[in-house]
Amino acid sequence: MVFVGLGFLATFLKRYSYSGITFNLLLGAIVIQWAVLTNGWILNFKDGIIKLNLMLLVKAEFAAATVLVSFGAVLGKLNPLQLVVMAIIEVLVYQVNELICLQLFQMMIKMSNAFKLANLEKQGCVHAY
């Protein structure tokens, strides 16, 4: 979704089609790594270890999707350095928003083995953001 779907969404713009794809790949790679780290620091930091699992990677994909939606609004206006700074700040704000949604307001659906329930939990936080 992050690399193919949102990346090729901006190709209809004749002037910004190549830069849209390139900056999407740049931001996607940086944001997914940064989201794994910030999610581990803010939400799942226990005993100095960030446990990497499939759910953490899915949460990082959702964080990247929120950044790339914002990227679509500023395509052609910002240079790559400004986009990376925007992405770093936006991921931090997204993770704090997720902390507020899931822990303070208790919007968390009880985790089960079904992937659908975990996906519904994240959609609520993404749309609240």
Image (tube, helix red, strand yellow):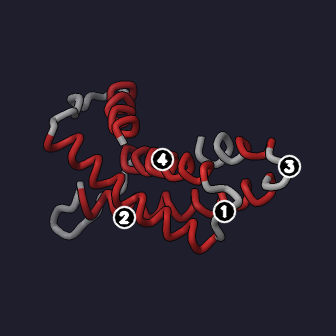
Give the mark toward the camera: 3 or 4: 3
Q: Quadrant of the N terminus?
A: top right
> Marks 3 and 4, how far apart in space?
24 Å
Q: Position of residue 13 (x, y in %)?
A: 80, 46
Q: Amino acid at mark 1?
A: Lys
Q: Is 98 displayed left or right of 57 in the figure?
A: left
The disc, 2 or 3, on the residue closer to the chain's N-terminal end is 3
| Residue at x 57%, y 71% (from the top left corner) | 82
| Residue at x 71%, y 60% (from the top left corner) | 76
Q: Amino acid at mark 2?
A: Leu
The disc, 2 or 4, on the residue closer to the chain's N-terminal end is 2
> Marks 2 and 3, how far apart in space?
36 Å
Q: Dot 1 corresponds to which residue?
A: 77
Q: Amino acid at mark 4?
A: Thr
> Marks 2 and 4, how far apart in space?
16 Å
Give the mark toward the camera: 4 or 1: 1
Mark 1: give few (<14), some (14-19) or many (20+) Cα within 10 Å: few
Give the mark toward the camera: 1 or 3: 1
Image mark for residue 37: 2
Q: Is 36 displayed left or right of 64 in the figure?
A: left
Q: Quadrant of the C terminus?
A: top left
Image mark for residue 14: 3
| Residue at x 20%, y 70% (from the top left corner) | 48
Give the mark toward the camera: 2 or 4: 4
Image mark for residue 102: none
The disc, 4 or 1, on the residue closer to the chain's N-terminal end is 4
The disc, 2 or 1, on the residue closer to the chain's N-terminal end is 2
